[in-house]
Amino acid sequence: MNEHKKDEKQTKQQVEEKVQTPDNETVTQEKATDVADAEEEKEEPSAEDKLAQALQQVQDLEDKNLRMMAEFDNYRRRTNKEKLDLISTAGEGIFKEMLPLIDDFERAIDAMQQTDDINSLRSGIELIYSKFIKFLDKQNVHPISTEGVDFSTDEHEAITTFAAGEENKGKIIDCTQKGYKLGDKVIRYAKVVVGE
């Protein structure tokens, strides 16, 4: 009988082993297992919750991506429209300033038909020429210098060479067509004869 009581006591001890919790409470093994299971459930969301959360994130990202694409498309359309407007009206100011020169040419043509005075025609044409040079200067268009300078492929186009002696080798001898620069950019190369 003593042995039977001993076995019962041991079984009871095994079932009711005491476990220490973070709050320094002692609970039985069964209660500790229940507490641990409850904590796991709280800490880790279920696979369904994870899937729902991931799907929500994907939907949010797709929505954000769609909005960004729409904004970029609107930006691209707006800038293309602005470029087209700029291109179509870019020369407007230049042409407006050229209109008085055309008026002067028309007056000169009329004067040539009505008079035989060559000197007045010459002075009229010189006046138009000087106005046009001032107009080009105002637009930052300048002629490329060719007189007595070394030949440069950056500004000049050699149309032929000419034997001009050792001192003129590689130098420009003659200019057949003036070249022009808009700022620092060559808009027409000077056609020149180069000494060899």
Image: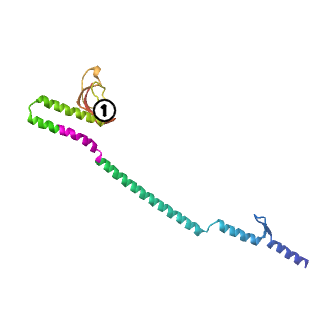
Q: Which residue is mark 1?
A: 155
Residue 12 in the figure: left or right of residue 114: right
> Where is 140 relative to 83, above or below?
above
Q: Is residue 135 magenta?
A: no
> Where is 35 relative to 76, above or below?
below
Amino acid beneath label 1:
Glu
Which residue does the image show at 42% across and 59% down from the upper left?
70
Residue 29 in the figure: left or right of residue 57: right
Residue 117 on image: x %, y %? 10, 30
Residue 111 on image: x %, y %? 12, 35
Q: Residues within 10 Å of mark 1 (few under 14, many from 20)?
A: some
Kindly give the residue lying farthest to the right in the view shown: 2
Which of the pair 11/144 is nearer the observer? 144
Which residue does the image show at 91% across and 77% down from the upper left?
2
Residue 132 on image: x %, y %? 23, 35
- The magenta stretch spans which residues? 89-104
Residue 27 in the figure: left or right of residue 103: right
> Where is 2 relative to 121, above or below?
below
Helix, strand or loop for disc 1: loop
Which residue does the image show at 19% across and 39% down from the upper left?
102
Look at the image and tell me in which quarter the N terminus lies.
bottom right
